[in-house]
Amino acid sequence: MTDRPRVVVTRRLPKPVEDALSALFDTQLNADDVAMSAEELAGAVRSADAVVPTVTDKVTAEVLGADPRRTRIVANFGVGYNNIDVAAAKANGIAVTNTPGALTDCTADLAMTLLLSVARRAGEGERHLRAGDWSGWRPTHMMGTKVTGKTLGIVGLGRIGQAVARRAHHGFGMRILYFNRTPVPQDQIADLGAELCTLEELLAASDFVSLHCPSTPETRHLLNPDTLRMMKPGSFLINTARGDVVDEAALVQALAGGTIAGAGLDVYEGEPAVTPELLGMDNVVLLPHLGSATNETRIAMGMRAVANLEAFFKGDPPPDRVA
Ligand code: 8YV
């Protein structure tokens, strides 16, 4: 028997994080790394003081309403917490925390990777070379789109949006437009010359549009047939936020019909499923939700979850409480 809080971790985490958790708590790890079913998640809520889920776990009202219920905190491994029914957590007196900050730089780096890759046809070029189709250099071979000096529209100028804007503005001389629910305080973005726009203005004027808003009922299908049609001809869409911010079927139409020139995607509506038409399009760069996937960042995210749990069970306010 132990009086240490019992913590269920739903997926394999980097070893230093698992070690830190096991040093502090009576921890149930997931050595096989197989996603837990809804019934298993409800079982965790019934039997553990805390659950550490990831984006692949649907922590629904049903899971959180398990009866009897022992869980008092859900410490999400990730900054986005649309996988958790926050209202149900609140209704059941369960705290929710996330891991902001830890993944800002790496997610911004990946958004730039997608932007550069799709503009410069890097994925297509690599496939071409590996297939043995490269017959040699020629002046008109695989000409892409110049990035430096172009206009980048950022939807959601929070931490990650600002980090992307900084890379694009200072590294690539890009003009920054942004659309945000509320104006961002000028002192936070004084170095960017970022211009606040309506979504319509941003879509019409941007050569690249990069999404950095959370997934909420309001942002679901923010990019839909109507808004995709507003995008500047020849422009590109980058999504490292959440798949459901984009109507994937409408995106396929916009790409196939030439409304936009290309897309760089790290997230999908039905992850891990990807709309099959996208797989056949050379003007689309597709990554498997790698935004935060570096050793350094995944460890930092885990340590943030540990810090949240540690504070909570000490009776202190967890640093990253969202509910
Ligand atoms: C994570 C993410 O890998 O933190 C987020 O919101 O999208 C990813 O970078 C994932 O959510 C981990 O659960």
Image: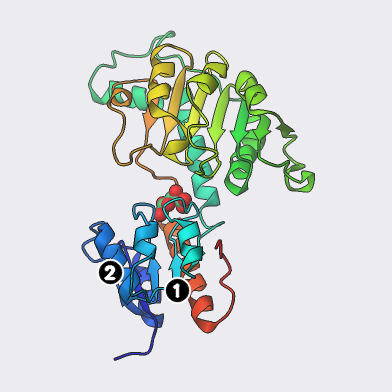
Location of residue 167 with respect to 62 vertically, above or below: above
SS at badge 2: helix
Q: At label 2, which amino acid type do we have? A: Gly
Q: Label 1: how many residues lie within 10 Å, few (<14), some (14-19) or many (20+)?
A: many
The quadrant in which residue 271 appears is top left
Mark 2 = which residue? 43
The quadrant in which residue 319 appears is bottom right
Tag count in the figure? 2
Kindly identify the residue that appears in the image at 38 percent across and 37 percent down.
269
Kindly identify the residue that appears in the image at 62 percent across and 46 percent down.
158
Percent from the top left, x then y, of residue 307? Answer: 51, 72
In this view, the residue in front, 6 or 143, is 6
Kindly identify the residue that appears in the image at 25 percent across and 16 percent down.
133
The quadrant in which residue 50 appears is bottom left
Side of 103 relative to 129 (left or right): right
Disc on res. 72: 1
In this view, the residue in front, 124 or 64, is 64
Q: Which residue lies furthest to the left in this view?
A: 32
